[in-house]
């Protein structure tokens, strides 16, 4: 994620990889790498469609963008 770059506010409740990339200020390929390595929250799957919940991403960023494992542990405690 590029710090200091203003994020474009998403307008949907779920984000496609392209929309998440724009929101985070990274490339679509980086989103897929981050997903594969567990650096972003787990996506939602609707048949073949992969989406990320907008509010989850915003909460995750607010918590300092921890790894997926750490994020899921924190969420289980609350």
Image: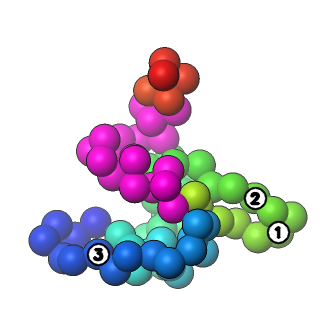
Which residue is denoted by mark 2 in the rendering? Answer: 45
- Look at mark 1 in the image and give the residue it sits on: 48
Report the magenta residues as a range: 54-72
Q: Position of residue 13 (x, y in %)?
A: 58, 66
Viewer-nearest of labels 3 and 2? 3
- In the displayed structure, does residue 53 sit left or right of residue 33? right
Q: Are marks 1 and 2 in contact (CB under 8 Å)?
A: yes
Dot 1 surroundings within 10 Å: few (below 14), some, or many (20 or more)? few
Q: How many badges with numbers are in the image?
A: 3
- Quick one: SS at disc 3? loop
Is residue 21 found left or right of 14 in the rendered image? Answer: left
> Which quarter of the rendered picture does the N terminus lie within?
bottom left
Residue marked by disc 3: 7
Q: Is residue 69 found inside the magenta-colored segment of the image?
A: yes
Secondary structure under tag 1 reads loop
Task: Report the front residue among 13 and 6.
Answer: 13
Depth check, mark 1 against mark 3: the one in front is 3
Q: Residue at x 57, y 58 (%)?
A: 53
Instruction: Residue at 45%, 36% (x, y): give it.
Output: 71
Disc 1 and disc 3: Cα gap in Å?
Answer: 27 Å
User: Is 23 drawn above or below residue 63 in the view shown?
Assistant: below
Of labels 1 and 3, earlier in sequence is 3
Residue 62: image location, x then y, percent: 30, 47
Q: Residues within 10 Å of mark 2 (few under 14, many from 20)?
A: few
Q: CA distance from mark 1 to mark 2?
A: 7 Å
């Amino acid at each position: 994620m590029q710090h200091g770059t203003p994020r474009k506010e998403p307008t949907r409740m779920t984000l496609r990889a392209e929309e998440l990339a724009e929101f985070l200020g990274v490339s679509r390929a980086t989103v897929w790498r981050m997903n594969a390595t567990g650096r972003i929250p787990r996506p939602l799957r609707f048949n073949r469609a992969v989406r990320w919940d907008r509010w989850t991403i915003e909460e995750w960023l607010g918590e300092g963008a921890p790894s997926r494992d750490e994020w899921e542990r924190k969420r289980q405690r609350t």
